Structures are given as structure tokens and as C-alpha cells.
Amino acid sequence: MMPQDFVPVLLTFAVVGGFAGIALVATHFLGPKAYSPIKQDTYECGVDYIGDSRSRFSVKFYLVAVLFVMFDLEVVFMYPWAVNFRTLGTFGLATMGIFLVILTVGLLYEWKKGALEWD
Amino acid sequence: MQTIIFALLALVSLFSAIMVVTRKNPVFSILYLVLTFFCFAGFYVMLGATFLAAIQILVYAGAIMVLFLFVVMMLNLREPEELEGKNTLWQTMGAVVAIGFGLLVLAFLGRSPGAGVPNFQPGEEAYVMGGAKALGKLLFTEFVFPFEIAGVLLLAAVIGAVALAKRKRV
């Protein structure tokens, strides 16, 4: 890997950003504009809306997100291990085994506590 | 070429970081923070830490930002204007801490000029070192113990999250 290898990544970002920017500017200049009070109103699939979107959300969503981040990080650690799987051999397998056992304790805990149930 | 990219990244990251702290709407702040994190990933690539750059985007710009959004949603900040004028004590304390930290960085740079400045034009060996393969080799041999401790840390976070959010039921 060299810095030059990341030019395609940079190009992708430029294309994505450029497309979004051009699409926004183009619709602003090309499309017809007709404002009316009904059109400016909040769109809720044709149903009359209640209150605004800034209502309070249940902590359950947050719990799901936190647990996702934990196991996301677990997989992050597994990637450099998998790349070196052959050279690390049994020792690598054992270390990853211990790591997974530690985190499986967490999984069992949340399972028993009912954190994986929605209600 | 590298200097131009660095300058662009620095400009965008400074701009978005300033936008983070000046926006009244916390959701906008978070979206600008995502942009800042993307710029950081660019810096990591320039420093040769390519694996870290990928993780920066996946974990920070992706997952951690979702957590931030959930916090904003749970705090139920209805009108951004409500915050104005209140909490002046906190604002003063924040300013004091920020200025103090800035002075600390300045003192450090004054004492040893160029000490904290990373090399933004590293050679190929830096890119080998920062890749997933070299990182894994080090992590699972020399730094095996810190790696297992990281597992314990994650376990503590899982238990903490469950204990806090599920407190009512048990």
C-alpha cells in the first residue's frame, strides 16, 4: 500500500460529493418552483401529523446501538487476526479464543437480563 | 500533491469542527462531526495508518455517531433557543478549560518546536506498518495482554449499558 493507492478512494469521494452538489444545484435552477402552504407543510405520507419529530425516544434504541458498537468493535479486532491467521497459528487461536470467551460472557449477561427482548 | 491534499483536509476539518461547536441545532453539530471524522480518516491515510483510517470511518463516523444521535433524541431538546443564556457557569468553565488546554499545547510546541508535528509524507514502510497485517502481527504477539484487557473493557461496557438501560425491570 502506498499513498498513490488511495487516489481511487479520493476520486470516489470527489464523484459522490460532486454528484450530490451538482444534483442539488441543478434542481434549484432547472426545476419549476410553486410554493403553497400545503406544500410547505410537514410531509407525513398524507396523514395528519401529531406534534413534531423531536419527541422523546425510548432508551431501548440506545441500548441496541450500544450493544451494536460493542460487537462491532469485537469484529474490528478479528480482522487483523484473520489476516495473520496462518502465521499466528495456535497461539493466535488461543488469544482470540480468550477474547471471544470474555465477550461471550457479556452476550450471555445481556441475554439473561432480557436486553435482547424488545418489550 | 500531498501538501495540497493536507491543506484541503485541514481546511475542511477546521471548518467542520468550528461548525460543530457553533451550531444551535445539535443534529447539525453531529452531522458536521461526521465530516470532521472523515477528514481525520484522511489524515490517518496520509500518515500511513490505513487500517486505523478504515476503522475511523466504520466505527466513529458510523457507529459512534449513531450513539450521539440517540443521545440527542433522548435528551429531547425541543427548541434550540431554550438553551441560550442559560448555563453561563458551564460556559465559563468550558472556556477556561479550552483556553488552558490551548495554552498547554502552545507551551509544549514552544518548548520543543516541531515535536508534535507528524510527518505527512511517510515512506512505504509507514504504509506497511499501518496496514492490518503488520498491526495484527504486533497486536497478537507483543501486545496480547492489552488486547485481552480491551476485551474486558468491552465486557464492562456491555454490562454497564445493560445495567443502566434495564434497571427498571429487574
Image (cartoon, grey):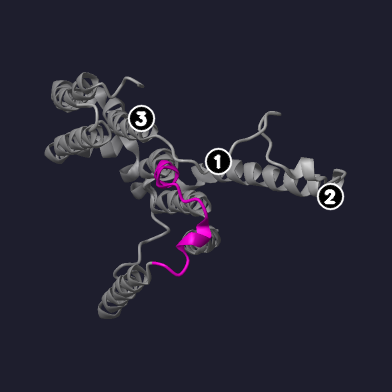
Disc 1 designates what residue?
A53
B10 versus A118 height, above or below: below
- Give the SS element for disc 2: helix
Comparing labels 2 and 1, the label whose residue is closer to the camera: 1
Viewer-proximal residue among A42 and A97: A42
- Cα separation, mark 1 vs mark 3, equals 21 Å
The quarter of the image holding the N terminus of chain B is bottom right
Residue A46 position in % (x across, y down): 71, 29
- Say which element carries label 3: helix
Amino acid under disc 2: Phe
Extent of the magenta region: B70-86
Relative vertical location of residue A105 with respect to residue B96 in this rendering, above or below: above
Inter-mark Cα distance, 2 to 1: 30 Å
In the picture of the structure, the residue carrying the numbered disc 3 is A64
Q: Nearer the viewer, residue A4 or B21?
A: B21
Q: Residues within 10 Å of mark 1 (few under 14, many from 20)?
A: few
